[in-house]
Image: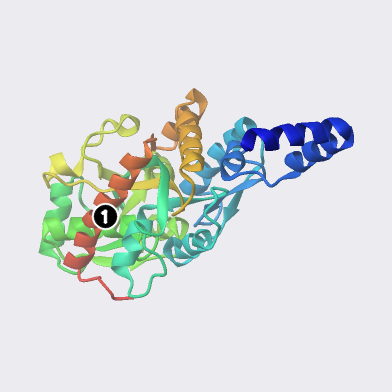
Amino acid sequence: MMGDDAKRFSRLLSAAPGLGLVAALMIASAPPSAAQKLEVFPSKPLRIIVPFPPGGGADILARLVSQQMTESMGQPVIVENRGGAGSMIGTEAALKAPADGYTLLIAVTAFVINPTLYRKVNYDPLRDFTPASLGIRFPYLLVVHPSLPVKSVKELIALAKAHPGKITYASSGTGLSNHLAGEMFRDEAGIDIVHVPYRGGGPALTEMLGGQVSMSFGTVLQTLPQVRAGKLRALAVSSGRRVSFAADLPTIAESALPGFEALGWYSFAVVAGTPAPVLAKLNQEIVRILALPGVRERLLELGTEPHPSSIEEARAFYASELKRWSKVVVRAGLKGTE
């Protein structure tokens, strides 16, 4: 029966050639299948949301990657800065985007800290987002104002124990990773130091330089030039091993607190539910870009380490970081305080 129907349809097209053209046009104009839609990704501009103001490390990373993606993917990749609320404003803006891969978020360390720190957070980092790749990671420099009479981590701890509650430490905001690095240090060293939060790394650095606060865990990008100029004194790095850009500095772990490690990081994430082929293409692009010599050299100059990864590795990293920092938050008595 099916063979007879096919023959009749063929005779109909032969008798009326115009129908063949109509049929062809109907097929050509039919809506593309889901597979066809994925094959042409991206077919419109993309955006990368940075949950901080322009100029910082997350912004620099986003712009390096966006420039390369624009060239290789044939579509503009726009960087959108949405700072505020410890990165939550930008994160929540990304959460409202369609799950189509056209909006990426620079997810930072606070991305996994905020849900354990604040009572009301409108996202779950493991449920609502999927990592496209890790991006970079970086240590902090433990720095003190030159007026503080210490030249090593052991001397700093001894001074803090001799004068409980007198030494202050600056951070770029409550809940951000350099704040919690300070809390980890306070807890593991068994000392009483006072946290002084600021609205960003810039104001914190200004107060450090003025001597209004005693110490901080600063980013290499901001603090190393001040150390080299003699305006701050660096005691150690917060990574588990020494770093090439400050090879003369010991780690906190080798100086006084074995096992101590506190790293900041930036990664790329999309809304959960993004199609797997789109996610795979984004991962492939990000991993390729972070391995480019020019990009890698620029990131190393900033005191950061390129850290591309598979999607699975990034997902496991998110989970481990959530566990790590939630312990710090609980031990510091900060859980649910905001």
Q: Pick the residue in front: 185 or 149.
A: 185
Q: Quadrant of the C terminus?
A: bottom left
Where is residue 252 drawn, in percent x and y?
19, 44
**Residue 69: horizontal and vertical position, in percent?**
58, 36
**Residue under the image location 33 percent in, 58 percent down:** 112
Q: Residue furthest top?
A: 293
Report if residue 171 is visible in the image.
Answer: yes
* 213 relative to 37, above or below: below
> For this view, does 79 lie left or right of residue 88?
right
Task: Tally the numbered discs.
Answer: 1
Q: Nearer the viewer, residue 41 or 35?
A: 35
Q: Would you identify the image quadrant in which residue 214 lies? A: bottom left
Q: Quadrant of residue 165?
A: bottom left
**Picture quarter with the N terminus:** top right
| Residue 216, position as x, y percentages in the image | 31, 55
Q: Secondary structure at mark 1?
A: helix
Other-residue count near label 1 (Cα within 10 Å), few / some / many at <14 / 14–19 / ≥20: many
Q: Residue at x 31, y 33 (%)?
A: 246
Q: Decide: is 248 above or below 78.
A: above
- Residue 232: in sight, yes or no? no
Q: Please give left or right for residue 106 compared with residue 10 in the image.
A: left
Circle 1: residue type: Ala
- Horizontal side, residue 114 vs residue 9: left or right: left
Residue carrying label 1: 181
- Residue 194 lies, in percent from the top left, at 25, 67
Q: How is the image coloured?
A: rainbow
